[in-house]
Image (tube, rainbow, N blue to C red):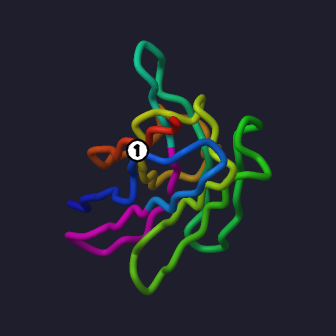
Amino acid sequence: QVQLVESGGGLVQPGGSLRLSCSASGGTFTPYGVGWFRQAPGKEREFVAGITWTFGSTIYADSVKGRFTISRDKAKNTVYLRMNSLKPEDTAVYYCGERQKAGRLPMIDEYDSWGQGTQVTVSS
């Protein structure tokens, strides 16, 4: 059973940057894709960015397009989320998930496993 572990969250000022990591362990890691999602207090978990494992195709939520970049290192079984120009509204717990089935990466119900999340707080 593959386990996902997120890291890299923290407190950052508006306009700052962070890089989140999602590392997979515990078995052969060959998902169809990996997605980053976030959940703010009182809100539903929402899609942020996704990447297909084999070809590296990416997709972003409109709210982060141009500010966030998702990438993967297949040798390290790790997916990254580089977040620039952070805003207070980016504050949330960020989760990574992996899905085995081909399909649209923003579809949260089709993910097979999740990490425990990492807190990102954007505040002055």
Q: Position of residue 80 (x, y in %)?
A: 51, 65
Q: Position of residue 68 (x, y in %)?
A: 67, 54
Q: Which residues are magenta?
A: 21-36
The quadrant the N terminus occupies is bottom left
**Does 109 sit above or below residue 19?**
above
Q: Nearer the viewer, residue 51 or 84?
A: 84
**Does 98 sit above or below residue 30?**
above
Instruction: Please name the amino acid that badge 1 sits on.
Output: Tyr
The residue most toward the front is: 124
Question: Which residue occupies 47% across, 19% down?
Answer: 44
Q: Nearer the viewer, residue 114 or 30?
A: 114
Dot 1 surroundings within 10 Å: few (below 14), some, or many (20 or more)? Answer: many
The residue most toward the bottom is: 75
Q: Nearer the viewer, residue 116 or 68?
A: 68
**Does 31 sit above or below residue 104?**
below
Q: Quadrant location of residue 92?
A: top left
Q: Quadrant location of residue 63?
A: top right
Left or right: residue 6 versus residue 108 is left
Q: Position of residue 72 (x, y in %)?
A: 54, 72
Residue 2: in magenta span? no
Question: Which residue occupies 66% across, 48% down?
Answer: 15
Question: Which residue occupies 29% across, 58% down?
Answer: 5
Q: Quadrant location of residue 23?
A: bottom left
Q: Secondary structure at mark 1?
A: strand
Q: Say which residue label 1 marks.
A: 95
Question: Which residue occupies 39% across, 82% down?
Answer: 76
**Does 90 sit above or below residue 68?**
above
Q: Position of residue 12 (x, y in %)?
A: 49, 48
